[in-house]
């Protein structure tokens, strides 16, 4: 049994219940939502949550295939309908017609669901079918003839059709004939009265007391024989039924009475048709309310990104990024995001002693644990991350808030002790215990000692849960007592602000002195308080503060090291690709050289053989032999002399080729076969090589690959330093804007570092980083990363018309 009695209200379950009730389409569904309760029966809870999970999946995949409107509550009319001779009115049948149609479509849809894909919803419908079949031989298919009969009787507007019965059709035809004849007769009298001036020309025929009459000025009422059926409020106008219309009006009244009797007969026959189906309808309406309730829970789950975790029939907690649904909804309204909690409780670490500063999130942690566990065991999906698992508890005990009671003379501390007494009497190994501000409300040393004794006893009982405290003795107990362990709400020691993140496995400091210093309490008072507290406690808090600070430093270094490792891996991969490329190129060059050499030798042998053959055939003299030898020598020289590679003409209009030898200080263009040459300045000439300045680096290039050009003008020409890859290709792929939107922190570090390296290599004077505005987190991360580069001159926001604070403009030195 849960404790206290108002547990659901304390943890906020009633607010979730109200949201689910609002999502119901019918009063039947609302009644099921009002009955939502915590259950300690695992098979039942498992069935509940699986039903909601399947409904959520069904709505996502086939949401428009069954009606989700007009879930009429027909139950109020079932009891009167069971009375013999009782019948439903035409207006009531209009609701019944739509309600039965929706009921039939829903039953048919869920009855035909795939049992393998949606086993729980399929089984739920089958169970109701079997339950109804046991009580009668009818099933939901009996609704179809009734719907067809209703469609035959009522038109689209809910009016009874003329052909609902042959008698009704005959009566309405006679009535229509009589009304037309009477109208002609009265129109004639009305025209005569208007011509005589007895009546205004804007008056027309009307009905009084169910009889057709003509309006007439009171002073002329005796000009036409008849009966006065009514008069106006002023008495100036009377409504006269002419004597000639008496018989026709009587006939029409008689036909109207006959029409009403026939309609009653039709409605009675419909009621008699449905009366035997009342027990079946009562069961199916209950089923429809249950389907509506499950659908409402699925709608709530969709709104809060709630899922079905792995279920365990034993006490435990293994939650990843759990979110408090009510707090998350409140924060969204003011544009903030919730900090999720990851919690793990098992047999060895059952009771979590949570410490940390005030307003740091300890109470929210307890409330989150209590609400999510209560929601799950009430049949709801949970807003946590995939891979989490839900344990099962027989009861939840909560001590949170001030429960002082003046009538019972209970103080705050007495109230807490009363709760602890109940916990010690009734808690067991399947109890989830949640205590906020454990041991407070009395003298600290005494309260801490009693709290320690109570906590030891709860640990011996095998309870699970979380205890919030500021007492150092409870933190120490958690380190040495089996079943207990420390946890702390993370605190930013640099800015003295809570981070609302739960760290498992270590105690936390209350940071009382640091917070007092931040809010401006005089330094002398703070130091005096330190002295009064005692060296032992001050050293303990100091140690916790240093531990927290060191942890944050090491986390930062670890993140930096991870980034460097990713960069090394990326460089290694580029190196491997480049190495493989060079090896392939080397093989291709060698093979090509061998092929050309082979062809050259073959051609040389052919020339020699041809020369010898010509000398023999012509019996050439010395002069002719000499000429043939000269031709052979010319061919040999052409084959052996290294022909320099002619650079392609420079296509860039800003560059002009210059003839003459290349010397130190000259500007040259490297011809690599690309459309844009790479430009650099000669620093040194070493034999057949030249050392060039290319952007921010230097490189050695063969002289035969260089073309002397005029010095560049003041406008910058993009140069791409050689680093073992195709620089022109790198330039072609380079963009002056880097888009980081949607990336995580680790991805931002890697992408930004690689991009700045490319900027430095290519010598770009100014680039832009697109990070968006949002909450400013990504912008701050980018600005902090850019501070590491000494080559950056300044970083500023883009002009407001071109993106403003959503774009960082980087100017290089």
Image: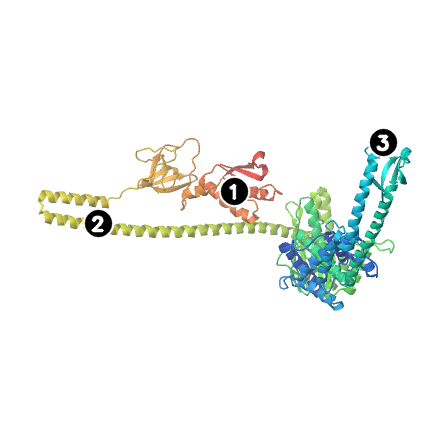
The secondary element bearing badge 1 is classed as strand
Q: Where is residue 144 in the image (x, y as percent from the top left)?
A: 71, 59
* Total numbered labels placed on residues in the image: 3
Residue labelled with disc 2: 603
Q: Nearer the viewer, residue 476 or 482?
A: 482
Q: Counting residues from the N terminus, which is met first, the one under dot 1 or under dot 2?
A: 2
Q: Quadrant of the rendered structure where residue 133 is?
A: bottom right
Q: Quadrant of the rendered structure where residue 706 is?
A: top left
Nearer to us: label 1 or label 3: 3
**Residue 607 showing in the rendered view:** yes
**Residue 9 showing in the rendered view:** no
Rate crowding at label 1 as few (under 14), some (14 to 19) or many (20 or more) other CA atoms within 10 Å. Answer: some
* Residue 738 disc label: 1
Rate crowding at label 3 as few (under 14), some (14 to 19) or many (20 or more) other CA atoms within 10 Å. Answer: few
Q: Is residue 741 left or right of residue 135?
A: left
Q: Counting residues from the N terminus, which is met first, the one under dot 2 or under dot 3?
A: 3
* Residue 196 disc label: 3
Quarter holding the N terminus is: bottom right
* Residue 59 disc label: none
Q: Are marks 2 and 3 in contact (CB under 8 Å)?
A: no
Q: How far apart are marks 2 and 3 (CA)?
A: 134 Å
Q: Position of residue 548 (x, y in %)?
A: 63, 51
Q: Counting residues from the N terminus, which is met first, the one under dot 1 or under dot 3?
A: 3
């Amino acid at each position: 049994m849960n404790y206290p009695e108002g547990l659901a209200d304390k943890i906020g379950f009633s607010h979730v219940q109200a949201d689910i009730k609002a999502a119901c389409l019918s009063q039947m569904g609302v009644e099921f939502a009002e009955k939502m309760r915590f259950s300690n029966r695992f098979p039942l809870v498992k069935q509940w949550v699986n039903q909601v999970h399947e409904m959520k999946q069904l709505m996502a995949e086939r949401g428009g295939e069954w009606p989700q409107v007009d879930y009429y509550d027909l139950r109020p009319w079932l009891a009167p309908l069971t009375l013999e001779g009782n019948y439903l009115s035409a207006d009531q049948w209009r609701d019944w017609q739509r309600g039965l149609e929706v009921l039939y479509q829903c039953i048919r849809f869920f009855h035909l669901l795939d049992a393998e894909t949606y086993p729980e919803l399929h089984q739920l419908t089958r169970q109701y079918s079997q339950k109804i079949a046991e009580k009668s031989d009818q099933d939901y298919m009996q609704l179809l003839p009734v719907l067809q009969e209703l469609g035959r009787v009522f038109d689209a507007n809910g009016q009874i059709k003329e052909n609902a019965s042959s008698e009704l059709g005959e009566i309405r035809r006679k009535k229509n004939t009589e009304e037309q004849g009477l109208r002609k007769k009265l129109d004639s009298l009305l025209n005569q009265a208007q011509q005589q001036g007895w009546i205004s020309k804007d008056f027309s025929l009307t009905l009084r007391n169910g009889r057709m009459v003509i309006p007439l000025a009171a002073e002329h009422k005796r000009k036409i024989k008849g009966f006065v059926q009514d008069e106006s409020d002023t008495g100036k106008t009377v409504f006269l039924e002419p004597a000639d219309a008496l018989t026709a009006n009587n006939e029409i009244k008689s036909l109207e009475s006959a029409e009403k009797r026939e309609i009653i007969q039709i409605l009675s026959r419909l009621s008699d048709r449905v009366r035997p189906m009342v027990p079946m309808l009562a069961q199916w309406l209950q089923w429809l309310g249950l389907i509506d309730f499950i659908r409402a829970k699925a709608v709530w789950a969709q709104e809060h990104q709630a899922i079905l975790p792995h279920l365990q029939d034993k006490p435990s907690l293994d939650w990843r990024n759990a979110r408090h649904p009510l707090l998350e909804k409140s924060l969204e309204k003011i544009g903030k995001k919730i900090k999720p909690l990851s919690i793990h409780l098992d047999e060895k670490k059952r009771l979590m002693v949570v410490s940390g500063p005030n307003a740091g999130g300890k109470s929210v942690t307890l409330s989150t644990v209590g609400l999510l566990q209560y929601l799950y065991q009430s049949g709801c999906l949970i807003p946590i991350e995939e891979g989490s698992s839900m344990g099962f508890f027989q009861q939840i005990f909560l001590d949170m808030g001030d429960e002082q009671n003046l009538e019972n003379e209970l103080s705050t501390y007495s109230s807490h002790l009363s709760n602890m007494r109940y916990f010690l009497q009734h808690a067991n190994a399947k109890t989830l215990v949640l205590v906020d501000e454990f041991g407070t409300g009395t003298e600290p040393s005494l309260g801490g000692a009693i709290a320690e004794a109570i906590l030891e006893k709860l640990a011996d009982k095998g309870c699970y849960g979380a205890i919030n405290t500021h007492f150092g003795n409870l933190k120490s107990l958690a380190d040495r007592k089996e079943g207990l362990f420390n946890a702390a709400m993370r605190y930013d020691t640099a800015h003295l602000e809570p981070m609302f993140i739960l760290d498992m496995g270590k105690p936390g400091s209350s940071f009382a002195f640091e917070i007092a210093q931040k809010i401006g309490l005089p330094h002398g008072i703070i130091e005096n308080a330190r002295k009064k507290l005692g060296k032992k406690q001050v050293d303990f808090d100091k140690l916790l503060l240093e531990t927290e600070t060191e942890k944050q430093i090491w986390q930062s270094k670890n993140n930096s090291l991870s980034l460097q490792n990713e960069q090394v891996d990326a460089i290694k991969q580029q190196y491997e690709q480049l190495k493989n490329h060079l090896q392939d190129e080397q093989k291709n060059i060698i093979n090509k050289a061998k092929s050309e050499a082979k062809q050259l030798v073959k051609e040389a042998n052919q020339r020699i053989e041809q020369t010898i053959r010509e000398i023999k055939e012509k019996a050439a003299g010395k002069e002719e032999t000499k000429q043939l030898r000269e031709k052979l020598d010319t061919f040999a020289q052409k084959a052996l002399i290294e022909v320099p590679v002619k650079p392609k003409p420079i296509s860039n209009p800003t560059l002009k080729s210059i003839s003459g030898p290349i010397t130190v200080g000259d500007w040259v263009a490297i011809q690599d076969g690309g459309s844009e040459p790479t430009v650099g300045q000669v620093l040194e000439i070493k034999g057949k090589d030249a050392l060039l300045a290319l952007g921010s680096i230097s490189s050695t290039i063969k002289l035969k690959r260089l073309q002397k050009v005029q010095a560049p003008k003041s406008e910058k020409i993009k140069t791409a330093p050689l680093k073992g890859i195709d620089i022109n290709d790198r330039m072609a792929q380079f963009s002056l804007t880097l888009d980081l939107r949607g990336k995580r922190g680790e991805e931002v570090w890697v992408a930004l570092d690689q991009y700045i390296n490319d900027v430095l290599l290519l010598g770009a004077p100014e680039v832009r980083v697109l990070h968006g505005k949002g909450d400013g987190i990504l912008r701050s991360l980018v600005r902090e990363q850019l501070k590491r580069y000494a080559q950056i001159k300044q970083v500023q926001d883009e002009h407001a018309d071109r993106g403003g604070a959503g774009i960082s403009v980087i100017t290089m030195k």
